[in-house]
Amino acid sequence: MTRKQRAEILIQQLPLIYPDAHCELDFKNPLELLVATILSAQCTDVRVNLVTKELFKRCKTAADYADISQEELEGIVHSTGFYRNKAKSLRGMGATLVERHAGEIPSTMEELSAIPGAGRKTANVVLGNAYDINAGVVVDTHVGRLSRRLGMTTKSDPIKVEQDLMALVPREQWTLFSHWLIWHGRRRCKARNPECKECELRDLCPSVDHPDRFLKKGP
């Protein structure tokens, strides 16, 4: 089976397994999603959602993030880890949005990925989930791991993994495809002790019962 053939079957099967797959970060607007995504680095969505309940009450606009003190913001986001850098990024984000974008969240990859604390992955999250723009595929640790286990790439670099996936998956499904893999990674194909025997994709997976087969760094 070729990569393309496997991808086509996955696109058919995954929405049947996870019909409700969606971004699990809580947000009501593009700004909240951008903030939540920045906080999600090296942190669970569950923890981020707990923190943003308080944060979104304190900071409602880009100007609020630009004006809040480093000390106060660190206190709010402390439990998400790397809180000093995250607080600095959020304050820089707010200042950049106010100075360059009149306080609004831009809707292009170039502009979004240039915001402090953001990058291509964060931009893909915001564009795909807040604006319904399929600019790329979100490649987090789950998507990278499953893409290798499912034999869709041998790469370890997220940018190269994304390029491989973009070539295999129709553009209109880029955002959903990452959600499907993330949900499968969290619920079934875990980094440690994946549930291969119970896996719905068992017959399709080239590394079934040998989950580390494709996890070595590729070219």
Image (cartoon, rainbow, N blue to C red):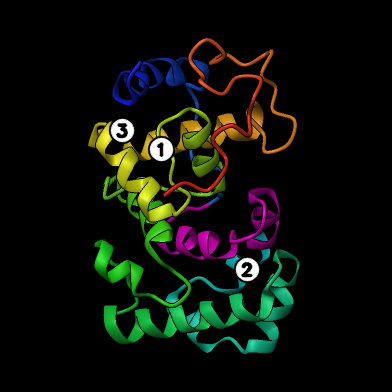
Residue identified by numbered label 2: 55
| SS of the residue under disc 1 | loop
Q: Residue at x 48, y 85 (%)?
A: 66
Q: Residue at left 57%, top 83%?
A: 88
Q: Can you identify the residue that label 1 sits on?
A: 153
Q: Nearer the viewer, residue 60 or 184?
A: 184
Task: Classify the position of the N terminus by image quarter.
Answer: top left
> Which badge, 3 or 2, is on the more N-terminal residue?
2
Nearest to viewer (mark 3 / mark 1): 1
Residue 50 on the magenta span: yes
Q: Where does the image place residue 81, in percent across and percent down from the top left? A: 71, 68
Image-quadrant location for residue 97? bottom left
Residue position marked by numbered label 3 in the rendering:
173
Q: Nearer the viewer, mark 1 or mark 2?
A: 1
SS at badge 3:
helix
Q: Is residue 46 visible?
A: yes
Local packing at callout 3 (Cα closer than 10 Å; few below 14, some 14-19, many 20+) is some
**Nearest the camera: 217 or 95?**
217
> Residue shown at 47%/35% (left/top)?
147
